[in-house]
Structures are given as C-alpha cells and as structure tokens.
Amino acid sequence: MILETNKVIKLIYQAYDNETGVLLDSNIEGKPLELIMGKNQLVADLEKEIKGMEKGEEKTVIVSNAYGKVKSEAIKEYPIEQFENIDLKLGMTLASFDSDGNQVYVKVAGFDENSVKIDFNHPLSGKTIKFYVKVLDVRDATDDEIYSGEVYYEGDSCGCGSGCGCK
C-alpha cells in the first residue's frame, strides 16, 4: 500500500539542519510518529516528497524553509519596562502568548536601555532541513479518523461516525 491522502502512516525520522549537520529532532529511539496523510500534520513539502512511498521504504528529503521564511514583521519592539524582572540576554528564549492565548516561545533579538526586540518567528524558520524518513506501516484511515484527523487505536472509537473517540 502506498502513502497517499487518507492513509494512516507510521514512520521514524531524523531532522538535521542541512547547513550545520546538527541533529534537530529524531524519534529513532522513541515511539514512531503516526499521522494521517493529507491532514496538514507534516511539514507540507516533506509530505509531498514522501507521498507514494511504501511500507519499508526509506528516503532522505531536503526541504528549504521547512518552517517558513523569516518574516521581519514577526520581530516586535517593546518597552524595556515590560521586562524589568528578567535578566535579558541576546538570543535567550522567553515564554509568551499569542493572540489566541496559546503559549509560544520567542527569542530576544536585541535590546538597549529603552526597548527589547522580540522575535516571534519559528526557531527553525529560514532553515533548510534534511529529513531522513522510514515508513514502518501504511493502512487506510477509518471514516472516524478521516473525520477527526486523529489516528485511533483499537478500542478508541465507538463507531458512531462522529470522530468523537468515545468508547
């Protein structure tokens, strides 16, 4: 069975900064990643490149701007007073909240005696990422999985068709 839209895939991967060779993320020693193809659960260009692979296949994929381009408008300036209890350091990571109230991590891009520049770009934006991927399994997604966008395991779904995941 080949990877295509509405297939549940199980894979292992490693992600490297293509410029430096530094390992950024891996699940080789951990639990395989399971997701539904076509549900925007993978970096878009990576998903395009692995479409058509089959169980047992391995592939190395290089994706430019995998996490988006660096956007200058994502660097905001704030009064230094908002940071008075923080020992600021250039490049340090701070926890913040987005407009929907979700916690996000931002980077101190610069500061002086009057203001602090905060970078809201994804930490990997602008980077080219090299992914090593191995497909461990492929199966058809159930109707509930397609509806909800979530992978269910045996006993997770009541079969009501709503994607509720009830038992």
Image: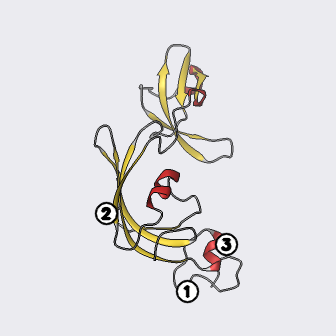
Q: Is residue 100 visible?
A: yes
Q: Nearer the viewer, mark 1 or mark 2?
A: 2
Point out residue 4 in the picture as x, y percentages from the top left corner: 52, 68
| Residue 94 sits above or below residue 76 on the image | below
Q: Where is mark 2, residue-wise? A: 28
First of labels 1, 3 by sequence position:
3
Q: How far separated are the C-alphas under marks 2 and 3?
A: 29 Å
Left or right side of 8 for 149:
right
Check whether the beta carbons of the residues at disc 2 and disc 3 lie within 8 A of each other: no
- Whether residue 26 appears in this view of the structure is no
Q: Residue at x 49, y 51 (%)?
A: 45
The answer to which of 159 and 138 lies nearer the viewer is: 138
From this view, report whether residue 45 is shown above or below residue 93: below
Furthest-front residue in view?
52
Gap in Å between the C-alphas at discs 1 and 3? Answer: 17 Å
Mark 2 vs mark 3: which is more N-terminal? 2
- Extreme residue in the top direction: 113
Which label was assigned to residue 155? 1
Q: Which residue is mark 3?
A: 147
The amino acid on which the numbered mark 3 sits, given as a three-letter code, is Tyr
Nearest to viewer (mark 1 / mark 3): 3
Mark 2 belongs to which amino acid? Ile
Name the side, left or right, on which 91 lies relative to 117.
left
State the residue at coordinates (62%, 48%). 102
Residue located at (54% from left, 59% from top): 41
Q: Residue at x 55, y 43 (%)?
A: 104
The type of residue carrying mark 1 is: Gly
